[in-house]
Amino acid sequence: MIKYDPKSLKAEEFINDEEIKDTLKYADENKDNLELVDSILKKARERKGLSHREASVLLACDNKEKIEEMYDLAEQIKKDFYGNRIVMFAPLYLSNYCVNGCLYCPYHQKNKNIPRKKLTQEEVKKEVIALQDMGHKRLAIEAGEDPVNNPIEYILDCIKTIYSIKHKNGAIRRVNVNIAATTVENYRKLKEAGIGTYILFQETYHKESYEYLHPTGPKHDYNYHTEAMDRAMEGGIDDVGIGVLFGLDKYRYEFAGLLMHAEHLEAVHGVGPHTISVPRVKRADDIDPNDFDNSLSDEMFCKIAALIRIAVPYTGMIISTRETPEIREKIIRLGVSQISGGSRTSVGGYAEEERPHDTEQFDVSDNRTLDEVVNWLMRAGYIPSFCTACYREGRTGDRFMSLCKAGEIQNCCHPNALMTLKEFLMDYASSDTRKIGEELIEKEIDNIGKEKVKEIVRERLVKIENGERDFRF
């Protein structure tokens, strides 16, 4: 029998099937053990996180009073670590050429319905200018896996192009990368290109299901895919983002696997995941989510988000435009710290006036513009942040995590959020959004703890009014 070992570099040892099954059995046996549930919640209040087994007990517990406690705690932990800031980003699809046969993705090789498209560098430039004109400063680039059409050299050229474009007051200051599992050498190249976070979704941690859902192509190799983050870390990338595609397999199994992956990264590298994403299977060109019988209710989806926040308090949590505005509103309160806005999931979608649907990777459920999303967040009491300072100041990996775990990252992030929001208001916002934003900034300046920092922020806000840009702590 394969032994569970979070410090192992072998996928089947750090994501161990027997351990997950034992965990789920333990959770079922103890879900009504309120004494144990209370002790786990007491531990969670120390803000040091929970093990996959402890968190799984809370997930299995269906006591309404205890679930409310979990939600309240998740909300408080989120405020303690990330304040009321919500970081904004957009995905940029470079190419939908793909050699894999994934059953849940319309980019799979056998799909003849969608036109295949790959952006030229000139088209990348047009997309970036369109994104800059919305006000975006942070992108997550996406591409199918195709060694001929999308080799690493193509991805590197695109990153170089993205960083090179300065249009009016626009600039993309951080490029995160969501591409297929690759080699240590290629991760080194991505690091040298100045990427922010390397993001790779596991899709499912259940090996048998994983192999069934990825019948052909290099992605079929479960171990190679699951061990990708270790190779990325070896290649010098110290900020990595993980996630599963909820709905492909049973959510309790995925939840335990996701937390085990976080524990593994912490155990081996001393740094857990910089971000955890929680996408759900959505309708797309030839994909029907009803074909997968593991869909989870909105209520359970929100509970999972809350428990990830409790179990991994330091991580950034991402929710995309896959979800409706209503679900996004609920889930942000429970721990999400990053959201996309004004997203288009088609190749070349931003340069088009009308949203194209023929090359979309999935249906977008939140079709609001970035300005509308920013307006909505501010009305709900959040600070939309376009900050990229940590990555550019070298506050990454263990340096970022130590500041975050000590609750000190807010000393930088809160003032940076206000200054980048001010840039957005000056350069891109509608008059209504600008009015709400100015009021919010004025109110939030008073929440800056240090008088000296408060004074500097006020001076810099005036400079931003006068046309200067890109201040940061």
Image: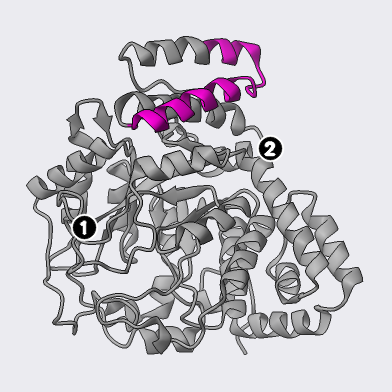
Residue 422: x, y in percent? 42, 24
- Which residue is rendered at x = 81% and y = 60% of the image? 41
- Span colored in magenta: 429-456
Q: Is residue 62 magenta?
A: no
Quickly name the residue at label 1. Answer: 355
Callout 1: SS? loop
The residue positioned farthest toward the right in the image shown? 35
**Render colour scheme:** one colour
User: As rendered, which of 205 and 255 lies closer to the eye?
Assistant: 255
Residue drawn at x 54%, y 31% as measured from the top left: 413
Q: Is 23 situated above or below 208?
A: above
Q: Residues within 10 Å of mark 2 (few under 14, many from 20)?
A: few
Residue 129, percent from left and from top: 18, 39
Q: CA distance from mark 1 to mark 2?
A: 43 Å
Q: Quadrant of residue 159?
A: top left
Residue 106 located left or right of residue 384: left
Mark 2 highlights which residue? 406
Residue 428 placement: quadrant:
top left
* Residue 435 belongs to magenta span: yes
Q: Residue furthest front?
A: 432
- Please identify the quadrant where the N terminus is shown: bottom right
Q: Residue shown at 33%/53% (left/top)?
A: 177
**Disc 2 residue type?**
Ala
